[in-house]
Every structure is written in structure tokens, then in C-alpha cells.
Amino acid sequence: MPADRPDRVIWRNGEFIPWNEAVVHVNAVGHASVSAAFEGVHSYWSPQRGQLLGFRFRDHMQRMLDSLRLSWLAPPFDADELVAAAVELLRRVSEPGRDVYVRPWGFAAGLHREQMVPAGTPAEIVIDSWDFESKLGRGRTCTLAVSSWPRFNTNASPATMKVFANYHNGRLGTIDARRRGADWPIFTNGNGEVTESSGACIAVIKDGVVATPDLSSGVLDSITRRTVLQLAEEAGIPTQTRRIDRTELYLADEIFLVGTAAEILPAVEVDGFPIGTGQAGPVTRQLEAAYHDVVRGVVDSHEEWLVPVERARVAG
Ligand code: PMP
């Protein structure tokens, strides 16, 4: 992403302002960042409909408001207002044929030099966006390594909060995985059970059953995970949300990462063990195709998840 975007606008507290003017004082970062919460949301261009389709915008905005509430910040907008703001932003910045990533986040308003941002501090809300390229259907795969850093204890810092502070652990694990030649880490919890990756959840397939760690294992309540579990059930594929042992990774037929950015990302190796045939498996490919068809508006079976964006008319 270029650092300088004179062509772009950003939404900040109810107003559209030039991207380059969306700045803060240095005292607004540091300790203030600890309480900040964010979202990553996709919108997909639909060639069939000639339209950009926001995916599950309301669920993402509600999760951000829930994270801010748990973080004791007070955002001045509700989920519907934030959905409307994101749609209006996309109306202004999107171009035909392009997929757009939407990045809303909320942080403590004002300058904070003390360690503890007080409860009830008003939150500033911003919504940024940039073009991204979906990898659905492109045959992409990844390799995994169980992180030498365990997942943070969800009773100490709830994994259901999508706060920047929780990503310190994810970053350490990602650097650890990359140093060991893998693409992404898989974190285990204090009981040695599988939780998730640094920015995506995980699903393990054995004998045709799709299993994913339950929320009490210490994972983000991923909206893509929820989506894929529902699509699997609708396709007659059995699913389980339960505790998953580390050895199940090594004996799985198929594994995939699941999340907004990962989409459905097949894993072909974990800690040096090839997964199944060492290639993306048939159940993963079936779910990837089903997810693709929903988010791109090829099928109309889940209109409730899609927010159509009508483009702004170009003046003249
Ligand atoms: N776990 C973590 C730690 C994440 O950062 C993400 C990305 N938001 C996910 C899981 C996947 O969540 P979602 O499907 O809602 O994007």
C-alpha cells in the first residue's frame, strides 16, 4: 500500500476526509493503542451482478463494538451507522472489477501518557480501505508450524476481543514459524490443545468430518469460520466444534486456515508432516468453491450476508 494516497478518502467519526489528513498526535499512540480494537472485512466484485458486494458487514461491525465494550471504550456509533458509513466509503473509492478490503477500527480519543486509559473513554472510529486480490480458486496452499510460543491465556486476555494488544502473541508466533521455514503458526493453549493461527482459525478434516476448535479453546469467534461451518452443514458435510489435540494435525486428511484474509487456505504440511496427499484435499476445495460462489454473488442462497454497493456517479 503506498504511504501517500492523495486520491483516497477515509471515514473518521462521521466525516469523509482526505486520506493524507487522517493523522494523530504522537501521544495518541503508545499506551492508548493497547485498548484499540479493529476489524478486517472483505467486499468482492461480482461479475455476474456488475456490483461490489460487502460480506457480513453488520457482523463485523457488531464484533468491533463488542470488542470496544470489553475494552471499556465508548464508541459514539451503532452497528447500522458503521455499516452505512462503510458502504458510503466503498461507493466513493471502489472501481469496477476490484475487490476492496475494509479496515474499521476504534481507539481511545485524546492524548494518553498514562498506562491505564480510563474506563468510559470515548472511542474515535475510523474506516480505511484498500484494494486486495482474492486468492479464492487460484490453487494457493500454505505450510504450518506449531508455534513455540503458546497462545495467550484467554482467561487473562479474552481471545474473543479483536484488540491490537492480542496480536503481539500472533506476531511472535508468525516470526517463529517463518524462521522455521513455515508460512503460518498454529498456537496451542495451556492444555496443549490446538487453538488458531495468528490471523485465521483452523479446520481439520478426518474421515469426511470438518472439526474446528470450540470457542472455549481460546479462539476469535471468526465470522468466516461461522460461515464455512454453515456452508458445510448445508452441503451435508458433518461438522464438529470441539477440543482438538495437536496429534490430530499430524494425522489429518486435510487442514485449512479460515478467515477474512486467509479466505479458505489449504495447508499441505505441518511441522514437516505432509497433510493427507500433500495437496489441497477434496472437502477443502468443495468448501472453497461454495464460499467463493456466495461471496461473489454467483449464487443467491445467502443474500442476508451480502451488502450491495452502488457506485457513486462520476461527475460530468
Ligand atoms: N483469528 C484471528 C486471531 C484473527 O485475527 C482472524 C481475522 N480476523 C480470524 C481468526 C478470522 O476471523 P474472521 O473470519 O472474522 O476474519
Image (spheres, helix red, strand yellow):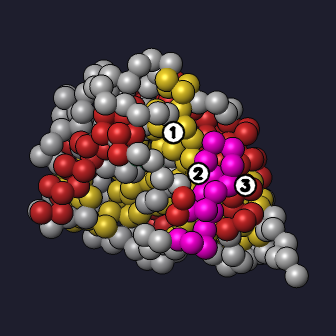
Judge whether residue 190 can be spotted in this image: yes
- Mark 2 or 3 closer to N-term? 3
Does label 1 point to a residue whose CB lies under 8 Å from ligand 1?
Answer: no
Quarter of the image for residue 219 reads top left
Q: Position of residue 74 (x, y in %)?
A: 55, 25
Whether the residues at callouts 3 and 1 have beta carbons within 8 Å, the answer is no
Q: Position of residue 244 (x, y in %)?
A: 30, 38
Q: Which residues are magenta?
A: 5-19
Give 1 or 136, whichever is nearer the viewer.
1
Which quarter of the image is occupied by the N terminus? bottom left
Distance of label 2 from label 3 (alpha carbons): 10 Å
Circle 2 is placed at which residue position?
A: 127
Is 87 a magenta residue? no
Is 11 a magenta residue? yes
- Left or right: where does residue 274 sit relative to residue 241? left
**Residue under the image location 43 percent in, 60 percent down:** 262
- Mark 3 or 1 closer to N-term? 3
Circle 1 is placed at which residue position?
A: 106
Mark 3: give few (<14), some (14-19) or many (20+) Cα within 10 Å: many
- Mark 2 or 1 closer to N-term? 1
